[in-house]
Image (cartoon, rainbow, N blue to C red):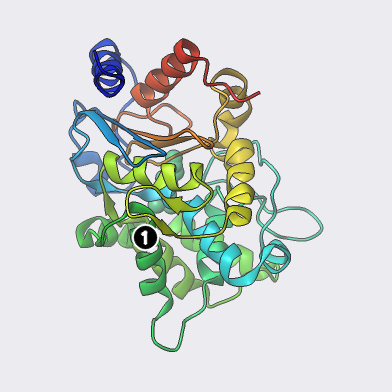
Amino acid sequence: MSASDAVTDSLNRLRAEFRDLPGGKPADYIPQLGLADPEAFGLALVSMDGHCYSAGEADVPFTIQSVSKPFIYALALSLLGLDEVSRWVGAEPSGDAFNAISLEPGTGRPANAMVNAGAIVTTALIPDAPDEPAFERILHCLGRFAGRELEVDEEVFTSEATTGDRNRALAYLIRSTGTMPVDPVLAVDRYFRQCAVRVTALDLATMAATLAYGGFNPVTREQVVSAEVTSRVLAVMATCGMYDGSGEWLLRIGLPAKSGVSGGLIAVGPARFGLATYSPPLDAAGNSVRGQAALRALSERYGLHLM
Ligand code: DON
């Protein structure tokens, strides 16, 4: 078997092994996400030479949700620099749920850019450009990481916009501590739109591979962000990407990762690969049950732990 067939074979075997793993359920606090097919299970890997490997439902579209956060943090760092971004959002694990208040005592900043509070601020930090409004910049940036033009799922956007009072409340709380750079209504609208961008597991694996390759997209061969920015993003993903499960994740799987409530999950093997899974049933922390199990098995079997 060729090396490339062996990768596809491993992904297919992982899928077969974990597809009937019980537990979890698709998020439904955003009503439209509750309609997802709980059986869908896709895995994808993109290597540093730009090869794409996949198994199962790796082409099925779903909304990116929180998996967008590290990429928009990368965009903010690229446009404003680490010192300016750090005035507004911290880099400490919150140890709390993704939707917790998580504002640091003293500075009032959100704890980090991976929890909702921090991500709303990161998104709000993206300025309009003369020829490109802020949201177009965000969409374009996600597309450069994915290697294709992406679109917003308007139904998921509306579903979250009409039910997202907790995020709206967070945005107002953040303004009350003096760390909200724009109007909270505008910030949350832009953040909901960003979360509703449609991707596939293959897109996410390409995005993860771009982080693995120091900001260079191995499929399009475009430098999307600098290697310096990428290293900052991976640091925050490693410590905060899986919310209050981040420590346990780093302990057992040992790869920077980011999950989303629609069931997407990425993991980055620096200078080696980008990995992504899609499976909607989530555990209590909001992380995909099958995705986590498959990545854990992969890490253990192939010795991918970085530490
Ligand atoms: O803000 C929210 O609640 C969603 N748009 C995204 C949350 C999310 O994906 C958390 N991930 N596990």
Which quadrant holds the C terminus?
Answer: top right
Which quadrant holds the N terminus?
Answer: top left
* Extreme residue toward the front, this view: 2
How far across and how far down the image is residue 71, in percent?
47, 55
* Extreme residue toward the bottom, this view: 130
How far across and how far down the image is residue 233, in percent?
58, 49
Q: How many callouts does the rendering have? A: 1
* Residue 101 visible (yes or no): no
* Residue 162 to residue 49: above or below: below
Give amino acid for label 1: Arg
Q: Is residue 91 left or right of residue 285?
A: right
Q: Bin the neighbour count of mark 1 within 10 Å (Cα to Cα): few under 14, some 14-19, many 20 and up.
A: many
Q: Which residue is rendered at x = 62% and y = 20% of the image?
A: 251
Q: Which residue is rendered at x = 70% and y = 59% of the image?
A: 109
* Residue 304 to residue 94: above or below: above
How far across and how far down the image is residue 246, in percent?
59, 31
Per the image, the residue denoted by label 1 is: 144
How far across and how far down the image is residue 220, in percent?
33, 54
* Residue 89 to residue 133: above or below: above
* Residue 153 to residue 253: above or below: below
Q: Which residue is rendered at x = 31% and y = 61% of the image?
A: 162
